[in-house]
Amino acid sequence: MSAASPLTDLEIARRATLRPIMDIALAAGIRHEAVELYGNYKAKIDPAKLAEDQAEPRGRVVLVSAMSPTPAGEGKSTVTVGLGDALAKAGHKTMIALREPSLGPILGMKGGATGGGYSQVLPMDDINLHFTGDFHAITSANNALMALVDNHIYQGNALGIDPRRIPFKRVVDMNDRTLRQIVVGLGGPSQGVPREDGFDITVASEVMAVFCLSTDLKDLKRRLARITFGYTYDKKPVTVGDLGAEGAMAMLLKDAVKPNLVQTIAGTPALVHGGPFANIAHGCNSVIATQTARRLADIVVTEAGFGSDLGAEKFMDIKARAAGFAPSAIVVVATVRALKMHGGVAKENLSTPDTAALQEGLVNLERHVDNAAKFGVTPVVAINKFTTDSQAELDAILQWCRRKGVEAAVADVWGEGGGGTGGDELAAKVARAVEAPQNFSPLYDLDLAVEKKIETIAQQIYGADHVEFAIPAKRRLAEIEANGWGRLPVCMAKTQYSFTDDPTRLGAPSGFTITVRDLIPKTGAGFIVALTGAVMTMPGLPPQPAAMRMDVNDDGEITGLF
Amino acid sequence: MSAASPLTDLEIARRATLRPIMDIALAAGIRHEAVELYGNYKAKIDPAKLAEDQAEPRGRVVLVSAMSPTPAGEGKSTVTVGLGDALAKAGHKTMIALREPSLGPILGMKGGATGGGYSQVLPMDDINLHFTGDFHAITSANNALMALVDNHIYQGNALGIDPRRIPFKRVVDMNDRTLRQIVVGLGGPSQGVPREDGFDITVASEVMAVFCLSTDLKDLKRRLARITFGYTYDKKPVTVGDLGAEGAMAMLLKDAVKPNLVQTIAGTPALVHGGPFANIAHGCNSVIATQTARRLADIVVTEAGFGSDLGAEKFMDIKARAAGFAPSAIVVVATVRALKMHGGVAKENLSTPDTAALQEGLVNLERHVDNAAKFGVTPVVAINKFTTDSQAELDAILQWCRRKGVEAAVADVWGEGGGGTGGDELAAKVARAVEAPQNFSPLYDLDLAVEKKIETIAQQIYGADHVEFAIPAKRRLAEIEANGWGRLPVCMAKTQYSFTDDPTRLGAPSGFTITVRDLIPKTGAGFIVALTGAVMTMPGLPPQPAAMRMDVNDDGEITGLF
């Protein structure tokens, strides 16, 4: 993240002294019998085996969101971990709830995704690689379904599934562009029925979204049964329940649904569980993990993908609504770099101090801060400090926040850690915010027509003038109504770089139109995806994949993961 | 397995009282620090952390093989477990080494693959489902390679890989015939380079074979680097090492290579690790698991896929040679059912007593028994008892064995368990056999030409007159020689139902020709696959997949897995 630090994230992680995860669990109030060890430093927690006086989720939820990010990201996970550590240090009973990283991007660009600097969850190499196997279980459940679907067609197709109308895809947890568009079932009558197909990355699977929105195993099975994987020759939806595959799929997920407990460098307990895409899905860790954390802690710090226009909006309107809880504060992560970018500075010059450009970029932060109020939730601005930031730049942001009347703090959780002093001020302000009177409500009512829900989000959150629906989207709106899916919430798939659907329009544009290209009903997850612009559900590898620098020595120690 | 038993395998497994796996480990002489728990009843063992006086593999190896099987199998895993239990009960320090089951066949036909009746390894549902994630790690490593290969071609193809000459495939651990023949990379220049492709099942992956033949992580990485995944436009082999992907692949496998410790119903320690196909690969559990077991126990009972013509021959000529140990006894599992089948009885009548037909079928058993001697290893016949067997039939086998001069015992390890009295006699005879003077040698010398190695196996083990090489096989022989792979051992891919390459020719045929259709060099695993007849590397699902009856209840209990 910074050139000035002598240690990489992996080196910092290696030097940290881990406590046995059973100690972390017991200190968090988790009974011995609810802990299933995966080695010494990872465990699954069985929510059904928590103590009786831990039955009710009570903890207050702090959502870490962000302004519109630079391509490198603004360090939301790092702030989430650092804030959690600082709250714990200040004496609050705290748990952190994060998404699990996806292997595809790790081997592609990212290297790792477990926070950074002195604000990391550990063991970082395990979490970044197979962890406790949750994503593998989701991949298996997804692909078992598709093997059963194609086998059903091959064996006589009693359900009358139209092989040309199967939007549900197989998945791999890999960046593999070659699998985006394929033809399967070639080779003659004994090899299957040919059709156009493709693979998505596992995190884009509806099974992942279902997994993350389910309240328990029973709800998981019910949601799996509701997934519409395809349509009949007369265009009627066919669900997993019609095929009868939800039992086998839920069986394959029965252990994966238990949240994973790990620890931060400072020893704060963290549940790292689930990780759906933030475009085609809602981009938050599992409801089961968040609710388990709320049963155990007074404050739960969690995050949602991208900025407030995407992750936070979905967190409020999809996740919090499905789980039935009210978030108590939204932390909006801002960086000097991102503010300068929104003020017109080119990417290659973001390290050069430029307070004037930064001032220009504050309009972007402002809209994100204002968005928090739309849900009745108190915002707190967290300025995630980089070593290249000038004091004048940091002061300018703080000054603007004072004028705006929003609480703000500079957080050096990367360099100092929340267990140090880097998150103290932020933690104090967040602790005050969660004690303020609560007034949460979702942005829109489910009874609104799908069209109107999309317009509400576009106008109130993005600042758009109006929404245009392309021809396929209009046709789909009618189908959604006809199939009785009109009461589902909406999951917007939009670029994270802009409030508009054009990634190059930075700042806080107004007077623009959002174009909805198409809609995808995800009846198991329980939302309607609205596609604006192209949405990537299978990333590709770059010219120099991160995987090529990764290695393991004879003693099993990894290099190249950071 | 038998209609007379009131309990299914799953029910028997559920009623068993499991000891904490740490207790099993400590009792087996494994130090606390070498044990990585996966819940209470599964653990990975780190061979590098065993005690210093356990550095040398010393235990004697008993290989459980079989006569040519019926489609239902002759209960080799069940006998392996029951024999291990009986040896342990008799006071021998014993470990069992088995293959891990593959999820594809479990969801397809099999239901489960962890022994049967009172001779099972536990926890059977965990082992049959994701277990400790080894197969998922192998799938990931395999598919990471292929994503990197197609990305290399897409990004400019510096290595000059010919997209029409990439025999290495992506894999899923699923029976999914629709993926056998596919076209990938469609959709235009931004989506990849189109080519014909296909998926294999994970257990058919060369990564699985490499995994199972490696002696440690260092050897694993070296073997991965040697894999030939494709050829250049001028037909030169391209290896994983040429691409530079072995580091990332080994990293993804660093935990998977540690053997998994579980227990039998009787509490005997079992290492369940790896599971390559027995046709396209060598069909044995990992060398690391077998050698770890030999460091810990005096007797190691292990198995190899199919009959002595396939699994045992490969065990001797590939695995034992690669690992550098000498097997001490071969148990040849025979059943009344299989003997009657080889004596001409139709499958639907195999439950009806028919001593005359059984006598006719003994020629098949005889050739398997004689094969053991070809390697200088003592055979012991284990008659795996079914409830439908008549005493006259059992007596006829025992009588024949006496005349033949081979030790034999009826084993009711399914109904009684080896921890009961079902395996006592077999255990006593096996314990005597491993004490006899040892005289092991592989069947052929590696310096023989590939052609001659195949002829040696076909003539000496199968009883063939000669071997015919089809045109593609002849061309491939020349390539193998030109590429310097001529010193590799041979891995025969042949039907398990017959000594010939025609599955309908039962008994012990003579005067036949084996036709080698093609050869596939597996330079990472370190063998040349010789294909006789069609070889299935991606099974399909049946009309009524086992998955459709599988379910999990709200408490996480599985039904339909047996």
Image (spheres, coloured by chain):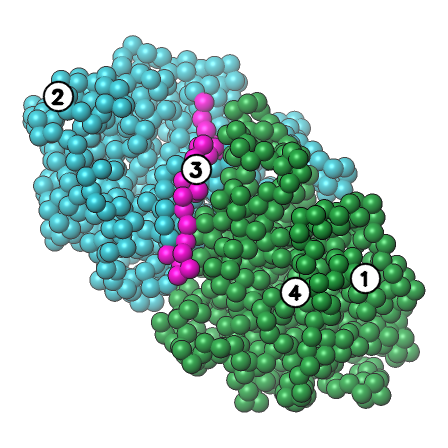
Chain colours: A cyan, B green
Task: Measure the C-alpha gap from mark 4 to mark 1.
Answer: 16 Å
The amino acid type, in three-letter code, at marker 4 is Ile
Q: Residue at x 31, y 21 (%)?
A: A498
Disc 2 packing (10 Å; few <14; some 14–19; many ≥20): many
Q: Is residue A480 left or right of residue B367?
A: left
The amino acid type, in three-letter code, at marker 3 is Pro
| Magenta stretch holds residue B298 | no
Name the quadrant containing residue A262: bottom left
Up the image or down, B330 lies above or below A363; here it is below
Image disc number at residue B318: 4
Image disc number at residue A545: 3
Q: Is residue A89 visible?
A: yes
* Residue B520 x, y percent position in the rendering: 70, 50
User: Which of labels 3 and 1 is toward the front?
Assistant: 1
**Same chain, labels 3 and 1:** no
Magenta span of residues: A534-557
* N-term-proximal mark, 2 vs 3: 2
